[in-house]
Image (cartoon, rainbow, N blue to C red):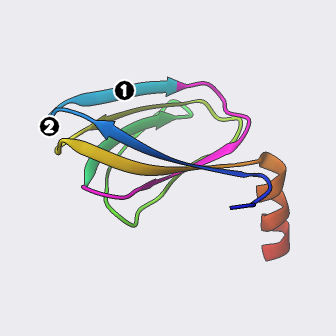
């Protein structure tokens, strides 16, 4: 799209209904924004050693700030799940937030 400093990826996860997916990510150098595009997903995550739980639906978003490690686990209730992953360079988002102030 020609957006300097932004990487957009579409991920589709073929899964068996009821399957659980887990991932632990080290501190990322870029901010990571996840947008679910389909079915509701039960989502557990831990950041700063505090557990959280929610149900993500189409239209929700989840931001992992750069420099923060994260652990997440989600249960799939359908045979596939599509998410949009947007990676934002750290300095790009900092500039945007300064403009909004």
Residue 32, given in percent of the width and then of the height, sits at 60, 46
Q: Nearer the viewer, residue 83 or 25?
A: 83
- Say if residue 96 shows up in the picture: yes
Give the residue drawn at x 42%, y 37%: 45
Q: Is residue 27 left or right of residue 17?
A: right
Residue 56, given in percent of the width and then of the height, sits at 33, 55
Q: Is residue 30 above or below residue 2?
A: above
Q: Is residue 78 left or right of residue 85?
A: left
- Say if residue 101 shows up in the picture: no
Q: Quadrant of the C terminus?
A: bottom right
Give the residue drawn at x 79%, y 66%: 96
Q: Which residues are magenta?
A: 25-39
Q: Quadrant of residue 36?
A: bottom left
Residue 8 lies in the magenta-colored region: no
Which of labels 2 and 1 is toward the front? 2
Give the residue drawn at x 75%, y 60%: 2
Q: Earlier in the sequence, mark 2 or mark 1?
A: 2
Q: Quadrant of residue 94?
A: bottom right
Q: Which mark is residue 95?
A: none
List the residue tagged with mark 2.
17
Q: Is residue 94 above or below residue 13?
A: below
| Secondary structure category for the residue under label 2 | loop
| Secondary structure category for the residue under label 1 | strand
List the residue tagged with mark 1.
22
């Amino acid at each position: 799209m020609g957006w300097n400093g932004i990487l957009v990826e579409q991920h589709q996860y073929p899964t068996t209904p009821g399957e659980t997916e887990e991932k632990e990510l080290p501190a990322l150098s870029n901010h990571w924004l996840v947008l679910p595009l389909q079915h509701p997903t039960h989502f557990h995550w831990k950041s700063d050693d505090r557990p959280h739980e929610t149900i993500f639906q189409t239209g929700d978003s989840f931001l992992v700030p750069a420099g923060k490690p994260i652990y997440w686990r989600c249960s799939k209730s359908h045979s596939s799940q599509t998410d949009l992953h947007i990676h934002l360079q750290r300095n790009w988002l900092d500039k945007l937030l300064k403009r909004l102030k």
